[in-house]
Image: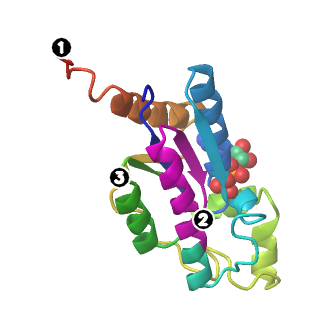
Amino acid sequence: MKQKGMTLWFTGLSGAGKTTISQAVEKELIAQGYKVEVLDGDVVRENLTKGLGFSKPDRDENVRRIGFVAQLLTRNGVIVIVSAISPYRNIRDEVRNRIGDFVEVYVNAPLAVCEKRDVKGLYKKARSGEIKTFTGISDPYEPPMNPEVECRTDQETLQESVSKVMKQVQERVHANDHVKVSV
Ligand code: ADP
């Protein structure tokens, strides 16, 4: 196995910047020659977890299924990029424990900033009641306690956020470099 697999798990509110940062990280990793696979929350909900809703059990099931696929890929040497709100701490930690090589990236911007961005117009719908259980407005978000990386997207540039994630990847990739194989 030439490449060490790991899962980079981006969690945070809608509009915090998960997709933006993870796409930039994907581009950078591919440019450096890594094998990468992306599991984006919105795409996943159209196929792997189609039919699941936004109740706590359904959100947990969504995360569990993403985690299962991420685990398979990770153990086969792929760098997996997951971008999903994944609002509940317990299920994130369950997935972390199962995968092992897990980097939690907390994409953090204040709710007011995310709402002002309103990239997909969802906050407006949540405020008007059109969407009933919207994370941050009418549904909980439990921030990570000890994320490996925190990106404050209201305070730092996209490139700064990307660099923080890349630093974690590099450290893990090179963690065993000092171990010499004797023949
Ligand atoms: P999410 O995937 O978390 O729902 P998106 O990546 O779709 O969020 O949207 C985040 C929005 O915030 C984008 O319009 C992006 O251009 C903007 N943005 C502003 N500053 C940053 C930053 N430092 N990092 C990431 N996104 C940022």
Q: Secondary structure at mark 3?
A: loop
Q: Are marks 3 and 1 in contact (CB under 8 Å)?
A: no
Residue 59 lies left or right of residue 67; in this view the side is: right
Q: Residues within 10 Å of mark 1 (few under 14, many from 20)?
A: few
Where does label 3 land, which residue? 100
Magenta-highlighted residues: 62-84
Q: Residue at x 78, y 56 (%)?
A: 119
Label annotation for residue 183: 1
Main SS of residues in magenta = helix
Say left or right for 121 vs 75.
right
Q: Amino acid at mark 1?
A: Val
Exactly how many numbered labels are in the figure? Answer: 3
Residue 82 spot, x, y in % from top left: 58, 52
Residue at 63% x, 85% y: name it: 55
Residue 141, x across and y down, in percent = 52, 72
Seen at 81% across and 75% down, the residue is 125
> Which amino acid, by three-letter code, is at mark 3?
Gly
Judging depth in this view, the residue of 107 and 181 nearest the camera is: 181
- Return the residue nearer the eye: 59 or 114: 59
Q: Quadrant of the C terminus?
A: top left
Q: Quadrant of residue 97?
A: bottom left
Measured in 3D between alpha carbons, the distance from the residue under mark 3 to the one under mark 1, in whole angstroms, is: 29 Å
Farthest residue toward the left? Answer: 182
